Structures are given as C-alpha cells and as structure tokens.
Image: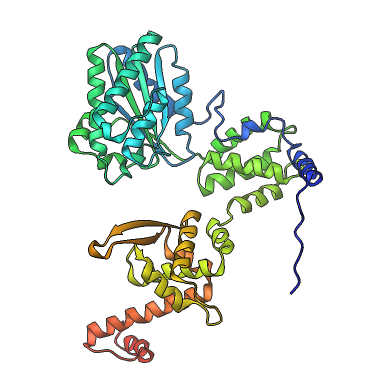
Amino acid sequence: MIYVLQVELDSKIIKSIRKSLEKQNSVFLEKKYLDSLYLPSKIIGRKEQAVQLIRHIESLRQGLMVPVISVYGRSGSGKSTVLRFVCQNFDDVISFSFVNLRKSKTLFGCVNSVLSELGSEPLKSAEGLNKAVEKIGLKIEEILRSEKKQFFVLVLDEYDVIFSDKRGKPSDFMYKLLTLEENLREKNLWLCIITISNNALADYNLDDRVKSRIGNTEVFFSPYGTEDVFAILEDRTQKAFLTKPSDEVLQYCSKICSENCGDARRALDLLRLAGEISNGTILAKEDVDKANDELQKDRISTLVSSASYHQRVLLAAICSNLFNSKVGWTATSLIYDEYKKILAKDHMPLSYRRSVDLLIEIENSGLVVSRTLSRGRHGYGTEYRLVMSPELVGPKIDKKWWSSIVESKRLQDMGEIYQNTFGRRRPTTKIDRLLKKYGY
C-alpha cells in the first residue's frame, strides 16, 4: 500500500491560496451586491404585493387597524426583502421591529427573540408567557413614546416556527398578542403584527377564537418568473461586476432558476459562483453550468461518503429498520442488532458502547435525530430517527444492498397478500407465479 504525504500548510501556501482567490474575485467590482441578504435600493417585480402592504399600513393612520397581516409564499420569493423595504420607507410614521424566529426552538424562545430584538433582556421560561408578553407591550410603548410615534409594526419572520414546539400553545401566544394590541389602542398607540411564512396553512393550526380575531388579511408572493429574475440579475450585475455579463448569460441563468424554483436568492448564488468559477474572465454559459452542478451537489451523498465504514453500517441499520417496520423511531439496541447482521464478515463488530458514540457522531452530522425515553423500571433508553426518507439515504450507502432490502420487502408483502388471500404460506419462490396466475 502506498501512502501519499499530505501537504503541510505554511505561510507560503497561504499566500498562494490568497493570490488564487484574488484572481477568482478579480471579475467582481463589489461582491456584496450578489449577497442574498443585501437590501437593494429598489425592488423589482413586486409592486402588487408592495401596494397591498402599503395600503394596510397606511390604514393605521385612518384609524383602521389590521391586527395581523399574513404574508406567505415559497422561499426566495422576496417576502422579507419587500417588507423591510416598505417598513423602512415608512419610518417617518411608524416604528418597526423585524424578528427572525428561525433560531428559536421553543415558543418561549420565540418570545425571547422578540424581546431581544426590542432591546430588552430575555426572561426565563419559569416567569411565564403572560409576563413575557406584558414586557413586550411595555417595551413597544417605551419605543413609541421615545420616538413620539403612534404606530408600531412587529414583523415575525419564519412565523411557522411557533407551531413546531409540541409542548407550547401557539394559540395562547397569538391571543395574548392580540389582547396586547387592544390594550395599546386604549392608550392611543397602535400595533400591527405581520407574519411571514413559507407555509400557507400555518394559521390553520390556531384556535377558532384566534382565527376570528385575526381575520383573513393575506399577501401572497408567487415565485419569480424568468423576466423578474432577469431584471433582478441585470440590476445587481451592473454594480457587482467589473464587466457586466452578457444578456445571453443572464437570461440563461434566469431561465435555470425560474424553471427550477423561482428563487431569487438561488439565482444570485448561481451568478456569484459562476463569477468565481470563471477565474477572472468574462462569464460564459459554461461557467453557469458548472456553478449549477456545484449548487445541486447532493449533501446526503457528501455526508454519507465522508462517514466511516461502521458509521455507514449503523446508518444502514436505521434505514433497514425504518423501511421494514415503518416505525419512525428505532431503539439503540435494535439498531445494534441490525448493524451486526449487515456488517461484512471480514469486519469485527464494534462494542455496543462504541457504536453508541458513532450514533452520536452521525446525529451531529444532521442525518438523524434522537430522543430519550423513560422505560420505567428498565431506566432510560435512546431512540433514533432519520431526518429524511430511507429511500433517499439507503441508495447513497450502497445501491446493491438497498436493492436487496427493497426486493426482500416486496416478496414479504406479496407473501402476506397470498396468506390473506389463500389462508396459508407458500415458499417465496412460488409466490410471484401464483400471484400472477390469480391476477395479483
């Protein structure tokens, strides 16, 4: 066996890497304009949605308060960007706070995210939701008094996160916010809540008492079409590149993104990566194709291929148990038993304890999640579940092995059909012929 010596990093190699990256970036004038988080000075292709939002916010000045405005649409359709842009252009009339709830794992975590964005210290969950919402109200009142304004807009981005906390009560949270709106109105202060979500059905998980008070004020963002994506790219590239890419390249990039997803962020990422791949030359269609292949690289394949042999076998055990039993969670002991069955004969099985350590490493990669359950007198036990379907993970581990699992399951299902039909078992070698004869 021949071992290849790895190159050690030193200051000379670092300088060489920096020089290479500088050459890649030489095609750009200001790369920040291709950042999906950059807030542009003008919005393209979203006038209809902006008009709806402006109408609702403007109605506050006429004494008509829309308690909740639901903004929804697929990722990358411009929801957050347009809303920020509209609110910033209303700063002479309203105060606003833009809260992203995505990092919050619990309902109370969402409340603390709001408090943090308002400039207030977070609370402990033991202090209760009532106190937290009351503190939100006091902070909003303080901001409006200090800025000498009457109107406050609270934007809750990634709003559907509040429904992911199984132990929380989203309806209670929204009900308390609506009550807060009423309390502020008595002080001649107006609060409007705007929720942003990719899930158009998120509100349907609320109680009827909350739904009736929220109303049905909605603003839908449809996916960007080819012309819209092209206009966005053309606007950004004029500032981002030293030499603006040709319209042919921009149209090609727009067509790929609009047909695949209608996601403007994806289009900007595609163009940025194509610029880096071009290595300092003018962009061509071939650069866009290479960038698209890079963006479409399968993360599951990357994670599975980088795992050790025993990690892949443990992952295969989880896939096999889930596929055959259709039970989402699998106990560690069952995973270990299946692992020993799948393990190649020329490999020694790891100890149970070591396999548990590897399962934790697999969980850290994001492929599986775990939960700990109390088993009464038998103590506590850990169960694991795949984050995605076993049909996606199995073939990445080993195509031949996964095909055998699928075929085995097919024959087993056919055997059950035969038994239910004829009341007895037959050897699997005859099942296919008999089922074909009787039309199954």
Q: Who is closer to the viewer here, 401 or 196? A: 401
- Of the pair 353 and 86, the residue shown nearer to us: 353
Up-down: is 276 above or below 172?
A: below
Answer above or below: position of 347 versus 270. below
Q: Residue furthest left?
A: 209
Q: Residue 167 appears at what percent x and percent y? A: 26, 45
* Residue drawn at x 49%, y 63% as measured from the top left: 358
Which residue corresponds to the image point at 46% horizontal and 69% vertical from the top-left? 316
Q: Residue furthest right?
A: 12
- Residue 208, how many percent across, how many down? 18, 37
The picture places residue 56, in percent across and down from the top left corner, at 34, 22
**Which residue occupies 40% across, 75% down?**
337
Task: Say above or below: 96 vs 381.
Answer: above
Asked if one can make out residue 215 in the rendered structure from this viewpoint, the answer is: no
User: Left or right: where does residue 352 sit relative to residue 138?
Assistant: right
Image-quadrant location for residue 34: top right
The answer to whether 225 appears left or right of 99 in the picture is right
- Which of 124/216 is in front? 124
x, y (%) of residue 46?
A: 47, 30
